Image (cartoon, grey):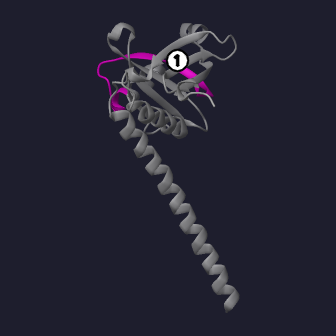
Amino acid sequence: MTPLEDDEIYFTVKFLGRIEADQPDGLRILNEAAGTLKMSEGSVASKLKNKHRKTSLFLSISGIDILDHKTKFMLHSCPLSTISFCAVHQTMPNLFGFISKGSAGKGHYCYLFKSTKFSHLLVSIIGEAFYAAKGREDFGGDKDLMVESLRHKNKILQKENTMLKKKIAKMEEKMDANKG
């Protein structure tokens, strides 16, 4: 069995970009980053220069590494202790992002991604890694990430609960119809 620090998982997502943030947390930052990146997509030069990259997002208890999917070149590496916020975009559920301190602790950056299937799952998993790392001595992150992760888990469980209640109601209707 390998130590927890060596365990990692990865997902293939599209990296939309990294935008400087004026604060370390908040959905406002995520929404602004999405708007800024969408506006910059409009120019012909940016379309030629910066097509959305297919990336591998590696997550471990140590941090998040963003690698180019084809070349495996490391684009960004963010220690988990520098990540202060992670969420799914409020109106576009296929977008998610996280906010991390810049290198040398200067400024904050919002990293934005697109995933057609895994946005909520990735935010939950990042939150789980954040929670697991919280007990480590060298970890100094913020609680916002964990809170946001728990909110997303709650939403997922509420949807599942609603779906199961509907299934039970349909089964009860069938049973009543068969009795009568």
| Image side of residue 83 versus residue 5, left or right | left
The answer to which of 77 and 3 lies nearer the viewer is 3
Residue 58 visible in rendering: yes
Residue drawn at point x = 33 percent, y = 28 percent:
25
Q: Which of the image's four quarters has the N terminus?
A: top right
Q: Main secondary structure of the magenta part?
A: strand
> Residue tagged by mark 1?
41
The picture quadrant where one finds residue 14 is: top right
Q: Is residue 124 above or below residue 21?
A: below
The residue lying furthest to the left in this view is 23
The picture quadrant where one finds residue 138 is: top left
Q: Position of residue 18 (x, y in %)?
A: 46, 16
Q: Is residue 26 above or below residue 16?
A: below
Bounds of the magenta span?
Answer: 7-29
Residue drawn at point x = 66 percent, y = 17 percent:
69
The picture quadrant where one finds residue 48 is: top right
Q: Amino acid at mark 1?
A: Glu
Q: Position of residue 148 (x, y in %)?
A: 39, 39
Residue drawn at point x = 63 percent, y = 86 percent:
176
Residue 133 counted in the magenta span: no
Residue 27 counted in the magenta span: yes
The answer to which of 53 and 136 lies nearer the viewer is 136
The answer to which of 91 and 168 lies nearer the viewer is 168
Residue drawn at point x = 38 percent, y = 32 percent:
135
Q: Could you tell me which secondary element the residue under label 1 belongs to?
A: helix
